[in-house]
Amino acid sequence: MDIVIGLLIIAVGAFCQSSCYVPINKIKDWSWESYWIVQGVFAWLVLPLLGALLAVPAGRSLMELFTAEASFNIWMTILFGVLWGVGGLTFGLSMRYLGVALGQSISLGTCAGLGTIMGPVLLNIFFPELNALSSLTFAVILGVVVTLLGIAIIGVAGSMKASSLSEEAKREAVKDFNFTKGLAIALLAGFMSGCFNVGLEFGKDINFGDLTPDMYKTLPATMLVTLGGFVTNAIYCFYQNSKNNTWGDYKKAGVWGNNIVFCLLAGALWYSQFFGLSLGKGFLTSSPTLTTLAFCILMALNVVFSNVWGIILKEWKGCSPKTIGVLIVGIIVLIISSFLPQLI
């Protein structure tokens, strides 16, 4: 029963993340760089800080935790957060050129596979005594392979969509649709986004041990990763503000109330995925395979729900039944990938 509860919590987090781009469409009269960094303040600073505080027992503090831990682990966690930040930037661009469904599918699918594999591999390089590679069992590798298979099938559906629709139909569904450019950006986004899980691997022991409940143990590391990602995004967004002369966005008092509400909502929905990941993993401790695969499962479910949103937002409007059929097969394979390792 605990395993089912854990997977359901991760699924709820995935649904929230896949919905995070919807409130952004309600933001008024701000450029991309302005609303992206403002929602990032909530998604990558405020909410992760509040989450990390849940891991701190009474009478202790986060500062005490960070000064007591090995500085190497902390800085590596932040470093991979900075690298993940590049993935976050290109992730937004992938949806611009491919739409919510296809953009998230390719980006998050690549992220799922590489993030799961890179964590133990890099951890083994720096700390061979931990034998981190032992977590990459046959069941884990199979889960990753099936996930990537599902992503590949959805990618085929996207290619079929790109070749079958007229330019007008593509633009109607996704304003700036460009499959070639979007595919390249999405693959880069997926590779760099996989660094998030690597950061979590380096920071998995940054907690108060038995004093921190299992469901909260990864939240301090999550905060450090998102802190690093915020730095990357802030540098780029402020550069774009200067380049495009959009600093004036922050002075538009008439839209601040509306935009702050929807930026907060977008940020909360985005952060929910990793808050849910931490809570869910707390219920998966009896299954080392699912604990290792939890990040991959989260990304796979993100793809499933993002395609549901893609259908709702009519991004697949005008596609042939065959294309929709291939898309549905890919979604089914991803759902199977989330539960297959437990059946082995």
Image: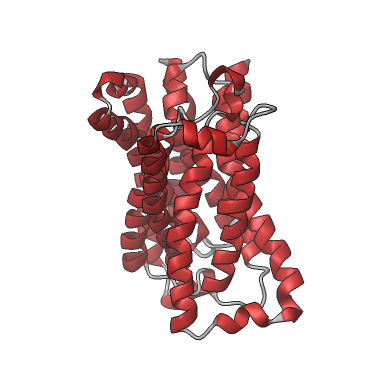
Q: Is residue 275 left or right of residue 254?
A: left
Q: Is residue 237 left or right of residue 309?
A: left
x then y, percent, for residue 181:
33, 67
Q: Above or below — where is 141 with respect to 151?
A: above
Quadrant the N terminus occupies: top right
Q: Quadrant of residue 189?
A: bottom left
In the image, what residue occupies the spot 49% across and 25% down? 339
The residue nearer to you, when weighing 94 against 195, is: 195
Count of labels in the image: 0
The residue nearer to you, when weighing 105 against 262, is: 262
Q: Above or below — where is 14 with respect to 294?
A: below
Residue 162 visible somewhere in the drawing? yes
In the image, what residue occupies the spot 34% across and 60% down? 183
The residue nearer to you, when weighing 82 against 16, is: 82
Quadrant the C terminus occupies: top left
The color scheme shown is secondary structure
The residue nearer to you, when weighing 99 against 78, is: 78
Q: Above or below — where is 181 with respect to 215?
A: below
x then y, percent, for residue 236:
43, 69
In the image, what residue occupies the spot 68% across and 68% down? 26
x then y, percent, for residue 3:
57, 19
x then y, percent, for residue 315:
53, 62
Residue 95 visible somewhere in the drawing? no
